[in-house]
Amino acid sequence: MRLGKRIPTPVGEEALWELIPDPTIILETDEIVIKRIPRAGNHALSILKDIYVEKGTMDDWKTLCELHYKGHTLAAGSRFYRCVYEQNGVPSPIGIMVFANPRPLDRDRMRVFPHMKPNQTGKDTTMMNKHRIREGLNKDFTWNNRTVLDTMYRSGGIAYRFKNLAYRMYCCEYGKRVVESRSSMGKFNPFSIKAGMKFTTPTSANALQAGIEFFRSNFIASPHDVVALLEELAAMPEGIRVFTERKLREFYYRHSSMEKSGDKRMLGTSRVDALDIGYVLRQVQQLVFGATVYWVWMNPDITYEKINGRRTLRFAKLPSRLPLLTFDNQGPNEPLRLDLINGVKDAPNL
């Protein structure tokens, strides 16, 4: 229905455009008109009071993973928190968040935390590198590897609340001070800002120029269109297809730091040679065009005490289940007001 069409309303036969604020025209052609209507007042989604955040499982991830644009893989050490909509005492998962071990190297992390950059003096040893990862990274950092919200519940103010509360719950349970995230969608949907995260200036992918030249030399189809690329690859004569697939695998291995770190570094190219070519192609596209945004959230639910002259961290003891609207009791970077949570008996104060 086009905006401005006369429809019955509770106040009479007035035109719809007379009842709402002036819309902003996003797109207007002979066939399509898209308008954004400003929100009137401070209306909140009525079901927010029935939504909770709690621990999840791999089964919750499997239920919702197809809704994620990169849902085919998970990082090492994955743990799960879920968002549930409870009706008549029965919780239904509507969102899932995955936390994992942070990656050993990240150029934007080194921009935010320069003291964590390895080999600054040129004298690092294997023991020093292991200590840095174990004590400086895995101890204090976690990686928000995936966040998914059911499409039926988006644009209702759920995602950023879920994100903030899950961060608090995970960090306090596992003793983490920092949550980091890398997101391609973060450039287009800034809900992480509402969750209290800070971000670095986006930078182009390292393999951008090399990747454009690679695709230009080996394919006719647009390098952004994975379907067209796979179809072109399948239509090649057998010898040329095998040769092109080998070049794809070589390009992926050469530019992928993930394939040359952790346990994978001992495998050489054998793992990449066994991967499905469709997966390799998607990973190459990610390396070339995936200019992700680096986000950081600092845990505010920490207190510091001096014990025997040493400063000791104490993490707040949070309930195992939080109402989603708990987010609204304080700022996203302020300590959680447990004394304001309805239904939590003997809640400790921060």
Image (cartoon, rainbow, N blue to C red):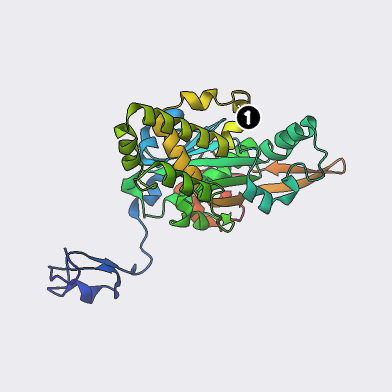
- Residue 35 pos. (x, y %): 27, 67
Residue sitting at 87 percent across and 40 percent down? 308
| Image quarter in which the N terminus is found | bottom left
Which residue is disc 1 drawn over?
A: 262
- The count of marks equals 1
Please indicate whether residue 236 sits to the left or right of residue 214 in the image: left
Where 64 sits versus 216, above or below? above
Viewer-side residue, 15 vs 136? 136
Residue sitting at 82 percent across and 44 percent down? 121
Viewer-side residue, 53 vs 216? 216
- Residue 276 visible in image: yes
Residue sitting at 48 percent across and 32 percent down? 249
- Residue 207 pos. (x, y %): 54, 46
- Residue 82 visible in image: no
Per the image, label 1 sits on a secondary structure element best described as helix
- Residue 202 pos. (x, y %): 55, 56
Give residue 179's quadrant in the image.
top right
Please indicate whether residue 214 sits to the left or right of residue 9 in the image: right
Please indicate whether residue 221 sits to the left or right of residue 30 in the image: right
Residue sitting at 16 percent across and 74 percent down? 15
| Kind of residue at badge 1 | Gly
Please indicate whether residue 222 sits to the left or right of residue 265 in the image: left
- Residue 172 pos. (x, y %): 62, 41
Viewer-side residue, 231 vs 183? 231
Give residue 253's quadrant in the image.
top right
Dot 1: within a 10 Å radius of its alpha carbon, few (fewer than 14), some, or many (20 or more) residues?
A: few
Viewer-side residue, 102 vs 28? 28
Q: Most extreme residue toward the right, as rendered?
A: 309
